[in-house]
Image: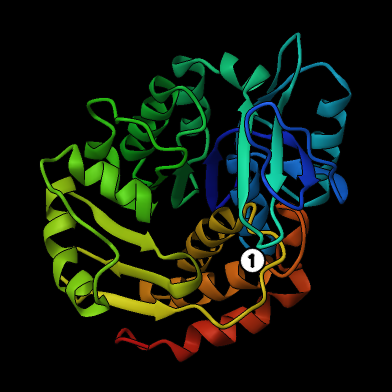
Amino acid sequence: MSQADIVVLGNSNVDLNAYLPHTPTEGETVIATDFQMGLGGKGANQAVAASRAGAGVSFIGALGDDSFATMMRSGLEAENIDLEHLLVVPGPSANATIWVEPSGANRIAVFLGASAHLEPDSVGQAVGAHPGAGYFISQLELHQDVVHAGLVSAKAAGLTTVLNTAPFGDLQPGILEHTDWLIANEIETEALLAGHGMTISLDGPLDDILAALPDWASAIGCHLIVTLGSHGAVGYRLGERPFFTPAPAVTPIDTVGAGDCCVGYFVALLSHGFSWQQALHAAVHAASSSVERPGAQASYPAASEAEAFFRLAREANGTDT
């Protein structure tokens, strides 16, 4: 039985990052200015960020039997993540092909490989094997029946559940009903609420967004965080006041995985006993620092830097910062 604070269900892949002067048009070949191979996958990214923020983390996922699997296992082991429930299946591991533009913006294609072989029943059992955990995180980079099984098992075990709606897809019935915190970016939030008959725009004044948050959260039935890229993030816990925390000014080099850094840090700080406002404030700063370095997991603040973000968390007092 794992003694993890946080259980993360998700995809682990190798990132193949090409840095381009511009995105190629149809039929165009562009010469890359640089190339890096790194470790990624939304679930693995969030697990690494949470572990570096000082939380005990268990990761549920799947690897193939190729050289990529060796890289990923070694990387996760180096982060002190519990891999008891990391499945190995014949065939290729997941990988992501990533184009990064000079602005740091990116385009990503993911091949799930081994991660597509996770089964709902085994995932539910794996989640239930963490009696001491307090939090469960998943994303939509797996088949939704697997995500649903993880959420159901986590709720049954009394864990606080966190769903990151990336990459976005129409949600299967039952997913929102088993989600405590939903974390989405601007595009995902607009698409999610459109499915609930609400046409919204996140391009308007911040005061209007904050005023609308209670209605948005009520529509989906769970606490809501909306990340706003370089502007920061807004959040609303049902029955409390909306909250905004701005992002610090940085010069982005590579935005790959920044949202995952935010999710992992947010939940890790919750597990340390910080309020959700304090956790979100620090998580936005951690994610902002990550865009100043290339790669996904490689860009996240090191464990030795965590105390600096804990100090930032203590600065947030639950009101607009």
Judged left or right of residue 124, residue 210 is left
Query: At x 41% / y 65%, what residue is drawn?
Result: 228
Q: Is residue 304 above or below residue 147?
A: below
Q: Is residue 82 visible?
A: no
Which image quadrant: the N terminus? top right
Q: Residues within 10 Å of mark 1 (few under 14, many from 20)?
A: many
Q: Of all residues shown, which one is farthest toward the top?
A: 90
Which image quadrant: the C terminus? bottom left
311 or 66: nearer the viewer: 66
Residue 61 quadrant: top right
Query: At x 34% / y 45%, what residue is drawn?
Result: 158
Q: Position of residue 154 (x, y in %)?
A: 39, 37
Q: Position of residue 14 (x, y in %)?
A: 76, 35
Q: Position of residue 105 (x, y in %)?
A: 61, 55
Q: Position of residue 184 (x, y in %)?
A: 38, 52
Query: At x 66% / y 66%, what residue is drawn?
Result: 291
